[in-house]
């Protein structure tokens, strides 16, 4: 079981969250090429190691958070509000 430390609600079961995928920087609107948008929307790195992800606390505060999670051990070493 994965327990996620929500910065607003505290330590909660992962069943309360929805994993929204890797946290990436969005391309600049109007300046990015079609290839940059395609890569932003569809390409995933999926490494074995530490990744930064966005999670949505569906059954809690209903806010987005950023989580740093190890993909092999599911250890979480950091979480913070999204947009920081
Ligand atoms: Zn929460």
Image: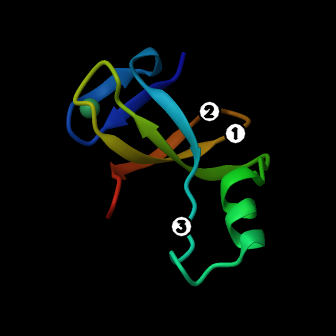
Quarter of the rendering containing residue 36? bottom right
Q: Is mark 1 within 8 Å of ligand 1?
A: no
60 horizontally vs 25: left or right: left
25 horizontally vs 66: left or right: right
Badge 2 is on which residue? 74
| Residue in the foreground of this view, choosing between 37 and 21 | 37
The image shows residue 79, relative to residue 20, as above or below, that is below
* Label 3 to label 1: alpha-carbon separation: 23 Å
Query: Is disc 2 in contact with disc 1, using a CB cutoff of under 8 Å?
Result: yes
**Relative image position of residue 18 (x, y in whole percent):** 48, 27
Q: Within the displayed image, which quadrant is ligand 1 positioned in?
A: top left
Numbered disc 3: secondary structure: loop
Of marks 3 and 1, the one in the foreground: 3
Q: Residues within 10 Å of mark 1 (few under 14, many from 20)?
A: some
| Residue in the foreground of this view, choosing between 30 and 60 | 30
Residue beneath the point at 45% across and 38% down: 55
* Label 3 to label 2: alpha-carbon separation: 26 Å
Disc number placed over residue 71 in the picture, else none: 1
Badge 3 is on which residue? 26
Q: Residues within 10 Å of mark 2 (few under 14, many from 20)?
A: some
The image shows residue 3, relative to residue 76, as above or below, that is above
């Amino acid at each position: 079981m994965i327990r996620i430390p929500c910065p607003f609600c505290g330590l909660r079961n992962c069943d309360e969250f929805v994993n929204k995928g890797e946290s990436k920087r969005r391309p600049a609107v109007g300046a990015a090429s079609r290839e940059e948008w395609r890569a932003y929307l569809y390409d995933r790195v999926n490494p074995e190691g530490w990744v930064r992800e966005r999670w949505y606390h569906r059954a809690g505060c209903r806010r987005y958070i950023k989580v740093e999670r190890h993909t092999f051990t599911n250890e979480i070493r950091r979480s913070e509000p999204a947009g920081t």
